[in-house]
């Protein structure tokens, strides 16, 4: 299963992470309708999600995070990510917003873009004290695919584990299962 996850996601992640971009793009805001389709709840939960990108991560920041990940694994990546300056935030109507730590984009066909966002996920006090298995999934990853007008779809994994496979590919556990689908993504002013 992990091999399938790596094959499905590694190419997308590496392409987005390796892409070049300008850091001078003005801030952008997106709103999406989030549908939790995980099997942890008896029925799907829905809410709106607001995403603000105030700046794009630089090539140097990308290279630093990749280097730390290759040398120190997930724990090193988590620490390095937590020390990155905020690039924006994510919020829902019933929660506090929290900082995004990494944002990259890649041009797509016909003026569209693939946007990849990453941050450390909020860890609640009970989880930190009791250290259940979920503590091993410290990242939140968001992928948006938008057209030239800023409309599109996306997916998010609130709790993801990242590791390097023996063949050097990056495995994102739980990301391809698409636990949160982002529908009706649109750029807002």
Image (cartoon, grey):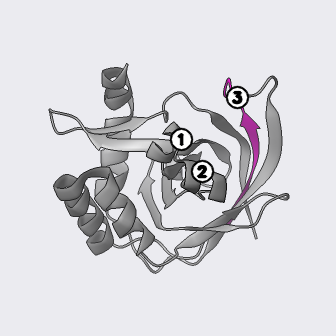
Q: Secondary structure at mark 2?
A: helix
Disc ID at residue 100: none
Q: Can residue 118 be seen in the rendering of this structure? A: yes
Element type at mark 1: loop
Residue 140: x and y in percent read: 53, 51
> Closest to the observer: 166 or 156?
166
Magenta span: chief secondary structure: strand
Q: Which residues are magenta?
A: 29-40
The numbered mark, 3 or 2, whose residue comes first in the sequence reads 3
Q: Nearer the viewer, residue 147 or 34?
A: 34
Q: Measure the alpha-carbon separation of dots 3 and 2.
A: 22 Å
**Other-residue count near label 3 (Cα within 10 Å), few / some / many at <14 / 14–19 / ≥20:** some
Q: Is residue 3 magenta?
A: no
In the rendered structure, are the residues bearing label 2 and label 1 in contact, judged by CB atoms less than 8 Å apart? yes
Residue 33 included in the magenta stretch of the image:
yes
The residue that appears at 48% across and 53% down in the rendered structure is: 116
């Amino acid at each position: 299963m992990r091999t399938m996850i790596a094959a499905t996601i590694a190419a997308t992640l590496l392409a987005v992470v390796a892409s070049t971009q300008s850091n001078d793009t003005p801030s952008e805001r997106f709103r999406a309708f989030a549908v939790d389709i995980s099997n942890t709840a008896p029925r799907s939960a829905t809410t709106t999600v607001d995403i603000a990108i105030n700046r794009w991560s630089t090539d140097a920041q990308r290279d630093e995070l990749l280097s730390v990940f290759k040398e120190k694994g997930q724990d090193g990546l988590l620490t390095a990510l937590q020390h990155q300056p905020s690039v924006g935030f994510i919020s829902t109507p019933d929660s506090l917003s929290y900082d995004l730590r990494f944002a990259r984009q890649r041009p797509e066909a016909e003026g569209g873009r693939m946007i990849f966002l990453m941050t450390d996920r909020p860890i609640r006090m009970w989880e930190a004290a009791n250290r259940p298995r979920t503590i091993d999934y410290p990242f939140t990853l968001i992928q948006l695919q938008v057209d030239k007008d800023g409309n599109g779809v996306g997916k998010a994994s609130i709790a993801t584990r990242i590791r390097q496979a023996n063949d050097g590919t990056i495995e994102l556990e739980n990301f391809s299962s698409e636990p949160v689908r982002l529908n009706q993504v649109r750029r807002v002013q």
